[in-house]
Structure formats: C-alpha cells, structure tokens
Image: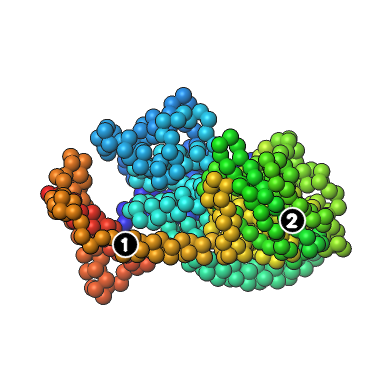
C-alpha cells in the first residue's frame, strides 16, 4: 500500500488545554478511517491541521508528492454572488473531464443529494442545502485523500444512505469524523480514537473497534487499580517526616508525583446514570390531535392529522428535508399555530424540547452560570438534590470545563450543555429535534440508555438510523403533501418493508408485461442505436478499467492461494469483495454498450 501521509509527534493545545500530545500515525492508499473522540478533545482540529487549514504546535506531517486533498469543513464557504452550478464547476479539475461533461456531472451529483435547483444563488441557502452542496463540491474535486468533518449532519436519511453506499463502493482514501455508527460500521476499515491526549488505532470497522476498545478499557481499569494501590503505599512514605526520608533517592519522589498524575485518569465516561435522572409523573391523558391542518402557501405540511398519543410511547419522525418535521413538533407545543384543528394536551404533561436551534445564550456567559440561571437546586427522583456544578459533571463537564465561556465551546459541547438544560427540568414528554448532530459517540450511548429507561413519552426527529433503532417503538413517516403514515416498527424494519414492497412491485410489473409486441417495436429493439460520442469514450474507459481491476483481483487470488503469511488480511479480503462487486457492475455496463458497437 502506498503511504499518503505520515504524522509524527503532532501536538496541539489551546492555552493550557492540551488536545493531543506527540501523536503518530499514518494514512495509506485505500484506508477508510473513522476518527472517534469525545467532544472538545480535538477531532475537528486534527482534520483542519491535516488539511492545512490550521497549524500544529509541533510535529511533522509528510504528504506524498502531488497529493490532492479534499476537505469538507463543518462550516463550508462558497463564492458569493455565484450560482450553485458555477461554484461546483470550479471544483472539477480541468484535466479530468471535457467542459461539456462538467454540467452533467454536477447535475447528476446534486440530484443524488436532493438538490434540484443547480442555477440558484448560493447567497441564501439553508443549513441542509449548504452541507449537500459542499459535499458535492468536495466529491467532484476528485481528491486522492478525502477528509470529511461530520458529513452526515443536516442530511436526511435518503442522502445519508446514498453517501454511505457511494463511499463504501468507491476506491477512495478517506479520513472522517462522524457520529453515525451504521455509517462508520459499513464504510470504515480502520478506526482512530483520540483518548487521554493519545492515539489508539484499531484495524477494523466500528463493531471491531467497540469490542477491542472494551478490552482496552478493561485492561486500563485494572492497571489504574494497581496504580492507586501503589500510590497509597507511596503516600505513606511521603507523609513521614522529612528527616525520615532524607537522603532517599530523588527518583522515588518524582515517581510519586508521576503516579499521582496517572491516578487521575478516568476510563469510564458513563457519568450520566439513566436511573438517577427520572421524569416527573405523567398521567394517563397525554395528547390528542384532532383534524390538524397546516400549510405555508401551496406547501401542505399536515392535512387532517388525527392521533391519540399513549403513555410511555416513543415515536420517531422521518421524512425528507422540508416536509415539515420540525413544524410538526413546534405546533404540538404551541410554539407555532395550526391553520385548523385542535391539540388537546394532558394537564400533567411537561415538555422538554431539544431543538435544532439550540440554546440562545450570551457568548460571555459561563457554562455553570447557564445552568444556575435555570435552577440553583437540581432535584432528582424527588429526594436527591444536586448543585448545578454536581449536575454538570454528569454531562462530562469537569469543574474546569464549567468555568469556560459559552463562546469557547465546541459545537458538540454546546449540544451537550443544551441536553443538560433540557433534562434538568425533569420533563415527562421529551421532544428531540435532531439530537445526534454534533454529539460524540460516547454521549450518544449515554443518551440512548437514558431514553430506553425514560418513564415518559418521547418524540424524536433524527437521521441517525442507529439512534432510531435503539429508541423508538414506531415511526411517523412524513411523505410530503400533508401525508403521515404510522409504521409499527423501528427504522430498519421500515427499510426492510420498503425493499419488500419494491420487490413485489417489480415482480408484478414483470408479470404484467405483454408477451407479444408490435413488429415495429421488436425491430427497433433488435437494432439498438449506435454509440454516442460520450458512450464511446465510456466504453473505451470501461475496457481499460476492467482489465486493470481483473489483474488486481487475480493478484489477490494468487496471494490467498499461495499459503504465504499475509499482512492486513482483513483489508485485502475486503478489497477482494469490493473488486468483485465493482467488476460485476462494470462488466454489465460494458455488455450494454457492446450491443451498440
């Protein structure tokens, strides 16, 4: 495998806050690497350094000569005053395609990502549109190394699944930060974790990482227990009168302070106890929706929606961007007025709303002050009392983190603070609008455990398929034009149902095809049209590609059959499977075109 870049002794800090210290790792051709870490520990900073957007404090990064790097930032920037098409055409390398072909490539990519107005200006775009266009821009630039920072944020599930399929099938080198666990599991062949300011590398997908990380944590926890035991003995020695240890070796005193520092390490991030933070009592009447209608101009959001919500119900809301998911939950809470119909909400219902907009806080306010402003006495289970400082530690905010100003928080830390602010009020009906955006995987696991044990009602809007599968009992599928279908199952159940329906539909269409066709139609089918210029170029390229891919596949087969010891056997086996799939596709297309030759 060709090395693309090598990182050696990389260090980065902000003030007295160390993100990572002397980390070393490499990225090779064909690697698909997921970067995992808690919020605020340097994931995005590392990507910005590798892409050249930011400088490290020290260390070296060596790139392969002429390496083309494509970087998807969390906050993309476009050339103002230009259209989407104009911005994206500039991303396509001149030598890669003919000028007449560029617009076709842009339109095809945008269509796959759900953007149907390529000639619109980039000056007034929504967050979801910005993310899609930026993603198209970086993919069209044909980089050797693709660096993606939270590529699935603000994408609906259809777009996430398209991107997942695209990246898993493409022969591309990838380094990305994402909290989408299905995405990590299906795309990545290597995981890099930033923890305790160091790098830990796992040669496998996300499922493999989880198993190996659990083993590492168990080993480290055992080591920590030994360190603390030794520390207790050394503390006795250090407490003796100075004269009792006069002349003792200085190294032992230094070793004591080193032990003391190491003993502060924490390997269990589950600070939130799901059984501690409970909901307030909720009665038998939750809410009823009677004939709710809502539209904006000609766009219908709800059309005569009627539903009775039951106690302890957990429902996920899915649908494409712009169908009105957020509008729905805002109307339920009375934050937005319906055109007609009525919501009847039970007297004991206490909403907790986690919105996409997040908390509206002053930049010069401290984290601890934001929670203290809500309450100075946090009551849990009706009996246990916490101070705001104690409560915040359960959401992974150390005492030092609590003194940070809001303006210095990362996106993930802001979302975690928002979550704490919602749960501190002990709601019994949680409404979560895209709660997984910017939350790290550790916090997501804690939140899922909390919601699974939550003795109240939950409505969650999310594009995170793993999250939906973990939490919900059924789905509201918003199909557009005011249509909402109630599906009895989680997201994976729903996807399997759709596949079955498509399969049945295809079978029905095949059965319904007439056996006899008009002679003129049969003749036209027997005489396929000649290749267009574009198809001719594609046919020539396919011939060369198939030869190259077949040669690579044969080399791997010879290696597997040789009996020799194989380095990176998992990666090579994965590549072999990938090659077979790619060859099947390309050979099918080659056969289609060959009929016109």
Q: Quick one: SS at disc 1?
A: helix
Residue 371: mark in rendering: none
**Residue to which mark 1 is pinned:** 512
Mark 1–mark 2 distance (CA, rounded to whole Å): 46 Å
| Quarter of the figure with residue 104 | top left
Identify whether 342 is placed above or below 76.
below
Q: Quick one: SS at disc 2?
A: strand
* Residue drawn at point x = 71 percent, y = 35 percent: 363
Tell me which colouring the rendered structure shows. Answer: rainbow
| Quarter of the figure with residue 136 | top left
Please indicate whether residue 553 sits to the left or right of residue 199 in the image: left
Q: Where is residue 434 in the image (x, y as percent from the top left)?
A: 61, 50
* Residue drawn at point x = 62 percent, y = 64 percent: 473
* Residue drawn at point x = 38 percent, y = 43 percent: 109
**Label 1: how many residues lie within 10 Å, few (<14), some (14-19) or many (20+)?**
few
Name the one closer to the observer, 87 or 481.
Answer: 481
Identify whether 394 is placed above or below 403.
below
Q: From where the camera sits, is residue 322 visible?
A: yes
Q: Position of residue 181 (x, y in %)?
A: 52, 59
Q: Position of residue 230 (x, y in %)?
A: 69, 70
Q: Is label 1 in contact with label 2 (beta carbons under 8 Å)?
A: no
Where does the N terminus fall, quadrant-wise? bottom left
Q: Is label 1 or label 2 in front?
A: 1
Residue 287: mark in rendering: 2
* Residue drawn at point x = 69 percent, y = 43 percent: 340
- For this orientation, the residue located farthest to the top is 81
Does label 1 or label 2 sit earlier along the sequence? 2
Please indicate whether residue 110 sits to the left or right of residue 534 in the image: right
């Amino acid at each position: 495998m060709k090395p693309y870049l090598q990182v050696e002794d990389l260090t980065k800090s902000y003030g007295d806050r160390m993100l990572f210290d002397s980390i070393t790792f490499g990225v090779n051709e064909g690697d698909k690497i997921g970067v995992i870490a808690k919020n605020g520990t340097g994931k995005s900073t590392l990507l910005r350094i590798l892409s050249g957007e930011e400088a490290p404090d020290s260390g070296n990064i060596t790139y392969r000569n002429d390496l083309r790097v494509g970087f998807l930032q969390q906050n993309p920037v476009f050339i103002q005053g230009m259209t989407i098409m104009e911005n994206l055409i500039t991303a396509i390398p001149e030598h890669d395609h003919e000028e007449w072909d560029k617009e076709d490539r842009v339109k095809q990519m945008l269509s796959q990502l759900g953007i149907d107005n390529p000639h619109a200006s980039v000056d007034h775009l929504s967050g979801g549109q910005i993310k899609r266009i930026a993603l198209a821009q970086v993919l069209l630039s044909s980089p050797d190394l693709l660096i993606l920072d939270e590529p699935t944020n603000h994408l609906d599930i259809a777009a996430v699944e398209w991107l997942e399929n695209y990246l898993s099938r493409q022969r591309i080198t990838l380094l990305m930060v994402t909290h989408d666990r299905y995405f990590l599991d299906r795309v990545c062949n290597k995981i890099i974790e930033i923890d305790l300011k160091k790098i830990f590398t796992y040669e496998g997908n996300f499922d493999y990482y989880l198993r190996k990380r659990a083993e590492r944590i168990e080993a480290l926890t055992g080591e920590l227990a030994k360190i603390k035991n030794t520390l207790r003995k050394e503390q006795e020695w250090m407490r003796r009168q100075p004269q009792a240890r006069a002349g003792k070796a200085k190294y032992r005193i230094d070793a004591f302070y080193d032990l003391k520092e190491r003993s502060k390490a924490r390997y269990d991030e589950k600070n939130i106890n799901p059984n501690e933070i409970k909901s307030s009592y909720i009665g038998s009447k939750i809410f009823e929706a009677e004939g709710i209608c809502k539209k904006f101009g000609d766009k219908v959001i709800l059309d005569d929606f009627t539903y009775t919500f039951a106690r302890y119900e957990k429902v996920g809301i899915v649908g494409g961007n712009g169908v009105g998911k957020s509008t729905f939950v805002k109307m339920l809470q009375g934050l937005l007025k319906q055109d007609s119909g009525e919501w009847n909400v039970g007297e004991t219902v206490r909403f907790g709303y986690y919105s996409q907009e997040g908390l509206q806080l002053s930049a010069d306010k401290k984290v601890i002050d934001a929670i203290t402003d809500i309450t100075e006495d946090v009551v849990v289970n009706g009996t246990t009392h916490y101070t705001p400082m104690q409560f915040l530690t359960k959401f992974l905010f150390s005492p030092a983190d609590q003194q940070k100003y809001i303006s210095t928080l990362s996106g993930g830390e802001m979302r975690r603070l928002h979550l704490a602010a919602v749960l501190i009020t002990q709601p019994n009906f949680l409404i979560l609008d895209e709660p997984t955006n910017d939350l790290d995987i550790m916090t997501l696991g804690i939140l899922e455990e909390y919601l699974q044990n939550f003795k109240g009602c939950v409505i969650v809007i999310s594009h995170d398929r793993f999250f939906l599968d973990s939490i919900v009992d059924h789905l509201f599928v918003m199909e557009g034009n005011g249509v909402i279908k109630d599906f009895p199952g989680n997201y994976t159940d729903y996807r399997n149902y759709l596949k079955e329906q498509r399969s049945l539909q295809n079978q029905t269409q095949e059965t319904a095809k007439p056996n006899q066709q008009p002679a003129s139609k049969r003749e036209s089918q027997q005489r396929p049209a000649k290749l267009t210029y574009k198809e001719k170029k594609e046919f020539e390229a396919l011939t060369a590609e198939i030869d190259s891919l077949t040669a690579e596949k044969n080399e791997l087969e010879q290696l597997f059959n040789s009996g020799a010891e194989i380095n990176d056997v998992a990666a090579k086996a994965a590549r072999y499977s990938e090659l077979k799939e790619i060859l099947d596709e390309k050979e099918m297309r080659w056969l289609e075109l060959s009929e016109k030759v």
